Image (cartoon, rainbow, N blue to C red):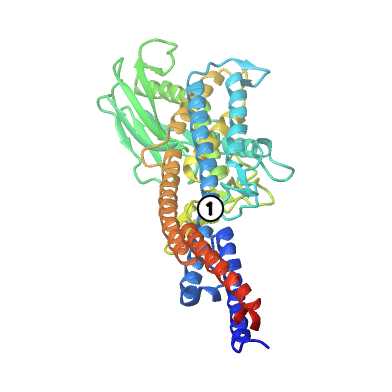
Amino acid sequence: MTVSGIGGSSSLSLQAIAQMRSQLDDLQRQLGSGKKSETYAGLGLDRGLTVGLRSHLSAISGYQDTITQAGVRLSLMQTALTQFTSLSQQAKVAILQSQYALRGGSQTDDQTNAKSTLDSLIGMLNTSADGRYLFSGRTVEQSPVETTDRILNGDGSEAGLKQLISERRQADLGTSGLGRLVVGAPGGSVTTLSEDAVSPFGFKLAGITTTIIGALVSGAGSVPPAINFGFGPTNPSAGDTVKFTFNLPDGSSRDLTLTATNSSPPGPGQFTIGANSTATATNFQAALTQSLGTLANTELVAASAIAAGNDFFNTDAAHPPQRVNGPPFGSATALIDGTPNNTMAWYQGDNGTDDPRMTAVARADQSLTVDYGARANEQGLRISVQNLAVFAAMQFSNSDPNGEAQYSALKQRIGAALSGGANQQSVDDIAGQLAGAQVALNNAKDRHNQTNTTLQNLLQSVEGAPTEDVAAQILSLQTSLQATLQTTAMLLQTTILKYL
């Protein structure tokens, strides 16, 4: 027989051993994984807090990924802009120092170099990252700028810059080559200088001044504008001057000064004093005609090329490229909108009129978005492309007596334009705005790092199983388990004989 109660005690001991073995297994899992539980349910009342913390950490991770991606793009954009500025400045210096020495027939070495520089600038504006063009506005899948060859030469029915320069040159010079001005002699000692039509082309009369005593000026309010200049009853004295001021198509102005002289024939910019005012007027008209022709074929030709470049490049969705309404071009009186079918579009990206920065947005936080888009046709970028393209497109001839003066007038305009105006956007302005976006993203990244550390520590305190505590519990449980096993073993071996 057995002693009553020993079997029940043994059964209870075995249950306790199983429970302690299960607890030991769980503690060993905690020691290996560092986690209190493999499920949220095992965390008890802390499970809601854990879910919230993990959701917050997941959102931060998404923001950090966005910040990293936008940061890479901004770094590439800043690198491109830095190189863009450097090359533009180098080109400016080279152009201003350029000498008129044609190589290969129609262009200087510096014009050839300008074309190579233009290739490089276009390459920078076509910078892409992870399949996204960075200077194309919202159309990130589209390369923003056409090739140099297509910009200059066009493609089939689509006219390029060279054709627009040629057409505009004809329109600005006019059929007489005098810049759309007409020198008339209504009679006696009076000379009339008038614009041939109301149009945007050629010289625009801005004013006249003279040191000749008794000279008469009239014509204010004439349509088209005209100036009547009369010498009066007496001849001028040697050294007396008549100065005309003209506005040119590129927005610049030039003076043409004629000086009275007793020499015959007169030198450049002079007119011979005749026997009377009528004869002087005849000599004055001849000198004016000759001087106008020279000014038109030098300064006006250069200004015309600059204007054509602006007509071709200064475009957006609301402002298509402008073409001379011809043929015939020499007598044209208006500009018309170019179309995709007849004019090459140099910029192929998003052609909107809104803020370029808003074309790319990075959400850096729940309440923070950063704008960092850009368009290659922004003024600060366009100016360099436009002026280098004009310089690379122009052609000259050694047989043209005005060729060197044309070249000089052109390079001075190109060099000045590459410096940028006081009220014009510059590449530095764009870089500065993008730098502001970088600062905002970096600040957000720092905040996220700090928040992430805090939340990770809190989550660890809720989910984590401290190694020291778990090890102590394991040691205590092992001791209890060993004692229970020994006790249970003794109970299981007890018989009536041993009991007695």
Q: Secondary structure at mark 1?
A: loop
User: Which residue extends farthest left?
Assistant: 213
Give 16 or 233, whichever is nearer the viewer.
16
Which residue is drawn at the image coordinates 42% and 64% (left, top)? 367
Q: Amino acid at mark 1?
A: His
> Which residue: 57% across, 66% down?
482
Vertical placement of residue 349 versus 288, above or below: below
Location of residue 98 with respect to 245 vertically, above or below? above
**Image spot of residue 401 (x, y percent):** 56, 17
Residue 225 sits above or below residue 189 on the image: below
Image quarter where the C terminus lies is bottom right
Q: Can residue 351 be seen at all in this image of the molecule?
A: yes
In terms of depth relative to the viewer, which is nearer, 358 or 146?
358
Number of numbered tags placed on the structure image: 1
The percent coordinates of residue 23 (x first, y second) are 57, 70
Q: Quadrant of residue 230?
A: top left
User: In the image, residue 389 lies at what x, y percent?
Assistant: 58, 34
Q: Identify residue for label 1.
A: 319
Residue 283: x and y, percent?
42, 20
Q: 192 or 428: which is nearer to us?
A: 428
Density class for disc 1 (Cα within 10 Å; few <14, some 14-19, many ≥20) is few
Residue 365 in view (yes/no): no
Extreme-top residue of the structure:
263
What residue appears at the point 53 percent right and 65 percent down from the top-left corner? 479
The residue closer to the viewer here, 14 or 245, is 14
State which quarter of the image contains the N terminus.
Answer: bottom right
Residue 468 appears left or right of 498: left
The image quarter containing residue 489 is: bottom right
